[in-house]
Image (cartoon, rainbow, N blue to C red):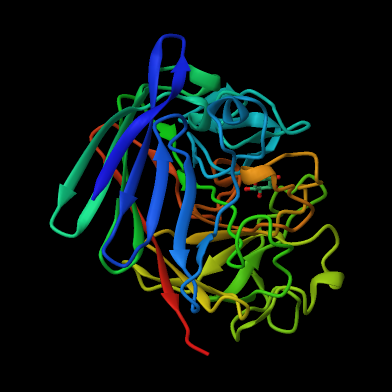
Amino acid sequence: MFKQQPFGTIADQEIILYTLENKNGMIVRLTNFGGIVTSIHLPDRDGKPRDVVLGFDSLHSYIDEHPYFGCIVGRYANRIAHGQFTLDGVSYQLAKNNGENHLHGGPEGFDKKVWQAESFQHGDDAGVILEYLSPDGEEGYPGNLKVRVVYSLTGENELKIDYTAECDAPTPVNLTHHSYFNLNGQGEGDILGHELMINADRYTPVDEGLIPTGVLQDLTGTPMDFRSPKTIGQDFDQVPGGYDHNFVLNKKGGLSLAARLKSTVTGIVMDVLTTQPGLQFYSGNFLDGSLAGKEGKVYQKNYGLCLETQHFPDSPNQPSFPDVILRPGEKFHHQTIYKFNIEAY
Ligand code: BGC
């Protein structure tokens, strides 16, 4: 089932807030501004509704600066060192918006765009198709890129995100979704007590600017080892600055389980499945209490975490990482599913 209502306007363009609801009482709200998921409500094991993502009540807060709450990130998610890369012998300079580096597609990335939107209902699945044409030269990227993101809520409590893109000149592409999850409910404390499993034997260590060194490091015996579920807080003190790392997912191709996150307070469990090779686990280290979120909740450090399915950061400059260059005639296609279950007492 779906509903739509006005959420405001940007330069005379109408911004819509879509509400998707399934038969289990799970409700997802999202908007065509930035493809932002503004809320995900589901009943916890006592039947009490919990909103498990951070965000704002109004459009203007999303237009103002914020740390990528709930949005679609592109054209290239995460960092590109010095905002530079060379492709087919030509050097490109991208916008720098993270010190010396380029982050999340630049200051006017896909999270700040108004997307064309169309809603649909197919049996138990309700969703929204979002489309955006990123022009040649936008934020310094070469070629026009036609992007399509389909969000759907299924009868099995899955929020499915299907990404496709096509270009008319070779360009790097890396698309992700940037919800900050808190399975205790938004504004209900930090996420250090959540249990996390990440299906990865290796991660990509970074320098001080959070740019990968190029090594695919075995994580055995390090605080990065989440192969057996543990609380995020368990080894947190041993990670300077907190978790903000890309994990090299163990995969044989296709859609597979990347991570499982659990709150023992609410019994809410979230599985992350993806076709992508990497997962950025970011523990909300830069949240600092300066943002007033939904229902007046204040988001302090570690009040939410991101599990961003992606290609590895800085891949255009890292020959040992999987290729991220999309060429004319090819189709970029990835899928990620956030699936929710409730564990009884
Ligand atoms: C990055 C963080 C960054 C945050 C922006 C995450 O995806 O990994 O380093 O600060 O996005 O809010």
Task: Please determine whether, in this image, residue 228 is positioned above or below residue 341.
Answer: below
Q: Quadrant of residue 217?
A: bottom right
Residue furthest bottom as drawn: 345
Instruction: Describe residue 91's horizontal placement relative to residue 250 as left or right.
Output: right
Residue furthest top as drawn: 12
From where the camera sits, is residue 162 visible?
A: no
Instruction: Describe residue 56's horizontal placement relative to residue 296 as left or right.
Output: left
Closer to the camera in the image, 205 or 266 = 266
Q: How many marks?
A: 0
Q: Quadrant of residue 302?
A: bottom right
On the image, the x and y values in percent for residue 53 come to 56, 54
Residue at (63%, 78%) from the top-left corner?
265
Instruction: Describe residue 304's horizontal placement relative to residue 258 as left or right.
Output: right
Closer to the camera in the image, 275 or 281 = 281
Instruction: Describe residue 61's horizontal placement relative to residue 257 as left or right.
Output: right
Residue at (35%, 63%) from the top-left corner?
25
Task: Please determine whether, in this image, residue 271 is positioned above or below residue 114.
Answer: below
Task: Please determine whether, in this image, residue 91 is positioned above or below residue 122.
Answer: above
Q: Quadrant of residue 283?
A: bottom right
From where the camera sits, is residue 210 visible?
A: yes
On the image, the x and y values in percent for residue 334 come to 34, 52
On the image, the x and y values in percent for residue 333 come to 30, 48
On the image, the x and y values in percent for residue 187 come to 68, 55
Closer to the camera in the image, 286 or 199 = 286
